[in-house]
Amino acid sequence: MGTFYHGDCLFVMRHDITPNSVDLIYLDPPFFTGKIQKGTWHPEAMEISYEDSKKFWDEKANVMREKAPEWLKHIGLKQPEFASYLYYMMERLEACYHVLKPTGSLYLHCDWRASHYLKMVLDEVFGYHQFQNELVWYYQTGGASKTRFSSKHDTIFWYSKSSKYTYNWKDIKISRTEKSLERAQNPKGARIAITDTTKNPDDVITLNQMNPMAKERVGYPTQKPEALLELIIKASSKEGDTVLDPFCGCGTTVIVASKLNRQWIGIDIDTSPRAKGKLPTAFQVIQNRGHALFDIANYVTRDLGEIKEMDGNTFESWVNEFYKATKPRPDKGVDGITPNGIPIQAKVYLIKYPVLSEFVTNAKLHHAVPKPIKEIIAVSQTGFDDSSRKRKFEIETADSIKVTLETPESLLESA
Ligand SMILES: C[S@@+](CC[C@H](N)C(=O)[O-])C[C@H]1O[C@@H](n2cnc3c(N)ncnc32)[C@H](O)[C@@H]1O
């Protein structure tokens, strides 16, 4: 069993995934096509799409100017949008690096649009010497060009976090029929023998993209074939290892990881239109595709829109899950207590002066809240008015208790 997260993988990797805990990361992010990638999920006949365009990374442009390496800033002078895309990728690849075990590996799937610079980004993040392979996924499917050579491959870069990494070539070896000249035992002379041997696969993988009739095809835009993931997962992880896909789409990686007895984590931001109360489309597709795999109990949201829609009880459970807090029983006005003893109040409505007053009194009286109280946390789905800020100041000065006021927006910016 693993976990699915709905949200930006940057936040999830920083907030939810233990550093140095993942054995293998495969990521197939937007390729900088500048388009909205569209598909139709069958059998539901629902449109599924994701943004691969400016809107997604444009806001990063200003931050990038401060923190990016010089070469990336330089690209920004001529191609600002491309530079923001690269910076967007750099931040996420850095987060990947932090969650990988020292023995872990990362496979980044991309194409000609950005592969040349993404390799430079990977060199920045992992170090030039941690590059292991540039895999070429060659396919014959797709259109043909008459103005240049037809583009028939994607690129997958493999980097390891250190020189100690997993490579199980025996699990992915391919057979080759080799003609070998064998000296016959027979003293009368030599004879040609056909021997079936195996070999380590080459870095060019010939495998067709899924045709429209392929059984595994669900209609998700840019869905990758299971066979490709099988090769990567078998090569760079063992049974029981943890495999993470931060851009998991319709879940190809996690489905294959689960079949191969690996633990898994899948993250997707899914921005396609979603009916209220329904799972985001990508996760509905996964649920439909691998029933045993998907359970609502292992689905965690880090999506603002979804959190803002929650009712009181769901929101309270979400806040407790976010802080890894537990609800005391009886609660007596304290909705949760964090592992280090901080009481939490979670409300869907606007928090005002009396609500905060009541909370601090309840926390002081509650037997399960460790004393002396150093901090209290109030989380409101709607926000706080000026009177609550006044009360915060009073509690902090009179009681020497730190009062932390949070909203879903501030929590999702916290990592
Ligand atoms: C190329 S598709 C992945 C397809 C996947 N390999 C499969 O086989 O289904 C890219 C996915 O990345 C998701 N995505 C884009 N930006 C993201 C982000 N910041 N965090 C998490 N997912 C993101 C999109 O919603 C989309 O599903």
Image (tube, rainbow, N blue to C red):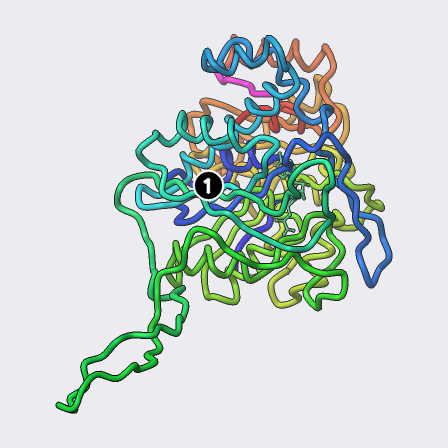
Answer whether residue 303 is magenta in the image.
no
Quick check: 186 above or below 245? below
Q: Is residue 317 visible?
A: no
The magenta stretch is: 401-405
Q: Is residue 130 visible?
A: yes
Front residue of 242 and 315:
242
Q: Position of residue 199 (x, y in %)?
A: 35, 65
Q: Position of residue 114 (x, y in %)?
A: 58, 30
Local packing at callout 1 (Cα closer than 10 Å; few below 14, some 14-19, many 20+) is many
As helix, strand or loop, the secondary structure at mark 1 comes to: strand
Answer whether residue 404 is magenta in the image.
yes
- Would you name the residue on which mark 1 appears? 157
Relative to 143, is 23 on the left or the right? left
Q: Residue at x 39, y 54 (%)?
A: 236
Q: Residue at x 48, y 32 (%)?
A: 93
Front residue of 351 and 280:
280
Q: Residue at x 46, y 25 (%)?
A: 373
